[in-house]
Image (cartoon, helix red, strand yellow):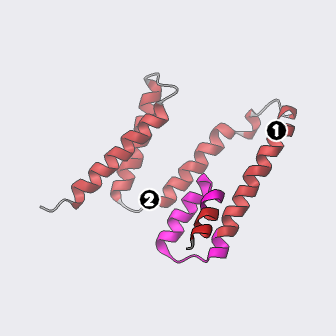
């Protein structure tokens, strides 16, 4: 890819498209037009949702029926599951999930996700290095 294409790709990237592309680009050569279309669609949706939220957010007083506290974590769990390819990644996902719940129960309300992510990433690096280590 040329630099301007990479810059455009990075500018339009969202969490969801990153997850999709990290799977697809590792397995196959995806056409650039399709990649940009995916990013652009997500970016436009993100911007449109932001505009709707700014101007229409006060019209919705009860958000509980939308189950956003369930839908967003469920979406990210689905994106995570799509990326798991081996036993180390399964172990790291379970460890990070358990760490997140445990840290939350310990009262780390503001930090539990960040600390669990750091713990999971560190464990993943250590496990991969340990498995690849020549005997």
Boundaries of the magenta span: 10-35
- In this view, 56 is above or below 110: below
The single residue placed furthest to the top in the displayed view is 107
Q: Where is residue 83 in the image (x, y as percent from the top left)?
A: 48, 60
Callout 1: helix, strand or loop? helix
Callout 2: helix, strand or loop? loop
* Dot 2 crowding, Cα within 10 Å, few <14, some 14–19, many 20+: some
| Residue depicted at x 80% and y 50% | 48
Task: Report, in whole angstroms, how far the alpha carbon at label 1 lies from the one at label 2.
Answer: 36 Å
Would residue 3 be found to the left or right of residue 84 on screen? Answer: right
Q: Nearer the viewer, mark 1 or mark 2?
A: 1
Magenta span: predominant SS is helix
Q: Where is residue 110 in the image (x, y as percent from the top left)?
A: 52, 27
Q: Quadrant of the N terminus?
A: bottom right
* Dot 1 crowding, Cα within 10 Å, few <14, some 14–19, many 20+: few
Q: Quadrant of the C terminus?
A: bottom left
Would residue 15 be found to the left or right of residue 97 on screen? Answer: right
| Residue depicted at x 77% and y 44% | 50
| Residue depicted at x 66% and y 58% | 12
Q: Where is residue 21 in the image (x, y as percent from the top left)?
A: 56, 64
Residue 95 in view of the camera: no
- In this view, 84 is above or below 3: above
Looking at the image, tell me whether mark 1 or mark 2 is earlier in sequence order: 1
Identify the residue position indicated by label 1 in the image.
54
Q: Where is residue 106 in the image (x, y as percent from the top left)?
A: 43, 23
Please identify the quarter of the rendering in which residue 96 is found: top left
Please identify the quarter of the rendering in which residue 54 is found: top right
Identify the residue position indicated by label 2 in the image.
84
| Residue depicted at x 57% and y 68% | 3
Residue 24 in view of the camera: yes
């Amino acid at each position: 890819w040329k630099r301007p294409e990479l810059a455009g790709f990075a500018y339009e990237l969202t969490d969801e498209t990153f997850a999709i592309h990290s799977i697809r680009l590792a397995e196959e050569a995806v056409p650039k037009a399709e990649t940009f279309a995916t990013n652009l669609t997500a970016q436009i949706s993100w911007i449109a949702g932001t505009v709707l939220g700014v101007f229409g957010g006060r019209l919705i007083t009860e958000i509980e029926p939308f189950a956003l506290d369930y839908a967003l974590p469920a979406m990210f769990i689905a994106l995570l599951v799509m990326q798991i390819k081996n036993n180390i990644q399964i172990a790291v996902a379970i460890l990070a999930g358990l760490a997140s719940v445990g840290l939350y129960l310990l009262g780390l309300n503001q930090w539990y996700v960040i600390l669990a992510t750091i713990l999971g990433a560190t464990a993943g690096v250590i496990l991969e290095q340990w498995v690849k280590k020549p005997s």
